[in-house]
């Protein structure tokens, strides 16, 4: 026996579970299903039965399987057709392949076709493997083999089709192309948000899964502000487009600045970059926006949690490096820049396996107090509590001073403040969601003549450590000074 110290590292010991009332609303497109808000769902099979496939199914299924969340599907209309990227032609035979524009893809795929046996187009004998995720699955000798038969068109179910000209295919020839999912217009997103605002179904967080541009971001921000006005305080996770294949970090960053530099939202965490995310439906590893995973994580933790805290990662089933550990998607640690432009991005940590949120940035204006998602969520808690406590006071007769000023009676003002401060303190300070909170009622408004009185809530949030600055030095003595210079 070799003497040794053996250590077993346990996982899933923090008891990190979604809050009991957490419901993630997901607005996205799908290949089928009723438009607008559906009933809450807790099982992936129910998603497939209703919506069949597409971004809505994938995003909801990930949240259910990975975080145990209840989801509220919100199907958007999809006037933006699914499409193709560039066809990479690896045919060494004489047939010329082209993408069939009449076959609309239904999701974001990286289609690869590899021919097992060759032959002449239009005659039997040609067989192939197919992959939807860039060859990460589906191309092994043990995977299903498909026959082209006498067809001149190779249909990839859900992933479009390829037309072949007359000629030959050689064994081991390969074709590949990316697809885009059908998308919603700004107006269609607005309609989905309106249905979400009007629904009586309970939901606590929102993921909008579909590429946003500046106009759609503005629509989302306006929809969330309308919810605030209606008394439903919510923030959302959404995303810009992913980098296209071969697009450099510098080119992508420049494009994002150009597309969103004049935009802002205190209510939206706008993700950028890409990631490989395991599907909870097909078990393939698709290239997706980080928002699919980040939105689920945000719904699964309490409002004050910083999504970048290591205890709440790594994101399950997410990769931004290839099988050899080399980065093949944006990694903010290696290529910083998106965070400085207010985008939420993913990162790795040296010596730690997995992928984490870099910072849970809100896409707020430069200089805003709402730097991180948790700041907005805590303010939402304060707004909800204040509104809940103040609404019963509306239309109530109140005592006023007898000096002719029409101001509220000081003793009554103190009583109201005491009641609401107790509620706010319990919800925020008592649950360690904030450092302190104070509600105050105006003593100077003429409530007798106007029927109106002002109030304010001030929240001191938790501080979030983003830099730990220390020094390490070699010293000549154990009694060396504690402060080391040089």
Image: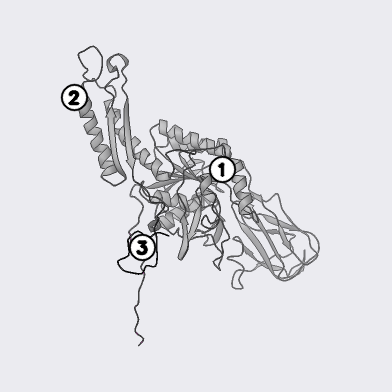
Name the one closer to the observer, 450 or 340.
340
Image spot of residue 200 (x, y percent): 39, 37
**Magenta span: chief secondary structure:** loop
Give the camera-side residue of 174 and 423: 423
- The circle drawn on residue 411 is 2
Which-is-in-front pick, marks 1 and 2?
2
Question: For residue 153: magenta?
Answer: no
Q: Nearer the viewer, residue 462 or 81?
A: 462
* Residue identified by numbered label 3: 12
Residue 358's tag is none
How crowded pointer 3 is (Cα within 10 Å; few <14, some 14-19, many 20+) is rated as few
* 2 inside magenta stretch: yes
Question: Is 54 placed left or right of 414 in the picture?
Answer: right
Q: Residue 170's spot in the image, x, y percent?
A: 75, 70
**How many C-alpha atoms fall within 10 Å of the one at disc 2: few (<14), some, or many (≥20)?**
few
Q: Give how far apart the Cα atoms at labels 2 and 3 are.
A: 52 Å
Name the residue at 44% across, 43% down. Answer: 371
Q: Earlier in the sequence, mark 2 or mark 3?
A: 3
Mark 3 or mark 1: which comes first in sequence?
3
Q: Mark on residue 212?
A: 1
Residues at marks 2 and 3 touching, judged by CB atoms closer than 8 Å? no
Percent coordinates x, y for residue 220 in the rendering: 51, 38
Is disc 3 in contact with disc 1, using a CB cutoff of under 8 Å? no
Q: Name the residue at 49% across, 57% down.
A: 347
Q: Quadrant of residue 438?
A: top left
Q: Residue at x 64, y 56 (%)?
A: 245
Question: What is the image's colouring?
Answer: one colour
Q: Secondary structure at mark 1?
A: loop
In the image, the segment drawn in magenta is: 1-14
Q: What secondary structure is marked by label 3?
A: loop
Q: Earlier in the sequence, mark 1 or mark 2?
A: 1
Left or right: where 328 falls relative to 485: right
């Amino acid at each position: 026996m070799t003497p040794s110290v053996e250590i077993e590292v346990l996982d899933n010991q923090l008891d990190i579970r979604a809050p009991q009332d957490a419901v993630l609303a997901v607005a996205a497109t799908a290949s089928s299903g009723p438009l607008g808000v559906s009933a809450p769902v807790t099982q992936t099979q129910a998603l497939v039965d209703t919506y069949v496939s597409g971004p809505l199914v994938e995003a909801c299924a990930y949240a259910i399987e990975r975080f145990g969340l209840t989801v509220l599907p919100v199907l958007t209309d999809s006037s933006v057709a699914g499409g193709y990227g560039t066809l990479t032609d690896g045919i060494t035979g004489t047939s010329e392949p082209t993408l069939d524009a009449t076959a609309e893809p239904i999701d974001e795929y990286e289609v690869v076709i590899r021919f097992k046996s060759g032959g002449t187009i239009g005659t039997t004998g040609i067989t192939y493997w197919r992959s939807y995720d860039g060859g990460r699955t589906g191309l092994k000798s043990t995977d299903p083999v498909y026959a082209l038969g006498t067809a001149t068109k190779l249909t990839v179910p859900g992933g479009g089709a390829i037309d072949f000209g007359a000629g030959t295919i050689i064994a081991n020839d390969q074709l590949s192309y990316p697809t885009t999912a059908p998308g919603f217009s700004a107006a269609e997103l607005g309609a989905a948000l309106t249905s979400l605002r009007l629904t009586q179904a309970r939901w606590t967080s929102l993921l909008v899964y579909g590429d946003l541009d500046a106009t759609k971001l503005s629509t989302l921000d306006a929809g969330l502000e309308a919810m605030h006005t209606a008394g439903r305080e919510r923030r959302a996770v959404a995303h810009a487009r992913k980098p296209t294949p071969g697009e450099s970090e510098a080119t992508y960053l420049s494009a994002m600045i150009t597309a969103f530099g004049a935009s802002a939202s205190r209510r939206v965490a706008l993700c950028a970059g890409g990631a490989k995310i395991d599907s909870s439906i097909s078990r393939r590893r698709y290239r997706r926006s980080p928002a699919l995973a980040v939105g689920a994580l945000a719904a699964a933790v309490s409002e004050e949690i910083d999504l970048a805290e290591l205890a709440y990662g790594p994101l399950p089933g997410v990769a931004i490096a290839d099988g050899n550990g080399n980065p093949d998607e944006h990694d903010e640690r290696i290529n910083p820049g998106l965070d400085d432009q207010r985008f939420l991005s993913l990162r790795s940590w040296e010596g730690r396996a997995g992928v984490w949120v870099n910072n849970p940035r809100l896409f707020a204006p430069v200089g805003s107090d709402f730097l991180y998602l948790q700041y907005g969520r805590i303010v939402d808690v304060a707004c909800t509590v204040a509104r809940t406590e103040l609404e019963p006071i509306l239309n109530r007769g109140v005592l006023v001073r007898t000096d002719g000023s029409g101001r509220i009676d000081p003793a009554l003002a103190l009583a109201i403040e005491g009641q609401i401060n107790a509620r706010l303190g319990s919800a925020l300070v008592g649950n360690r969601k904030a450092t302190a909170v104070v509600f105050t009622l105006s003593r100077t408004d003429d409530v007798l003549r106007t029927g109106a009185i002002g109030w304010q809530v001030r929240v001191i949030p938790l501080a979030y450590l983003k830099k730990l600055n220390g020094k390490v030095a070699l010293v000549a003595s154990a009694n060396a000074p504690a402060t080391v210079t040089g």
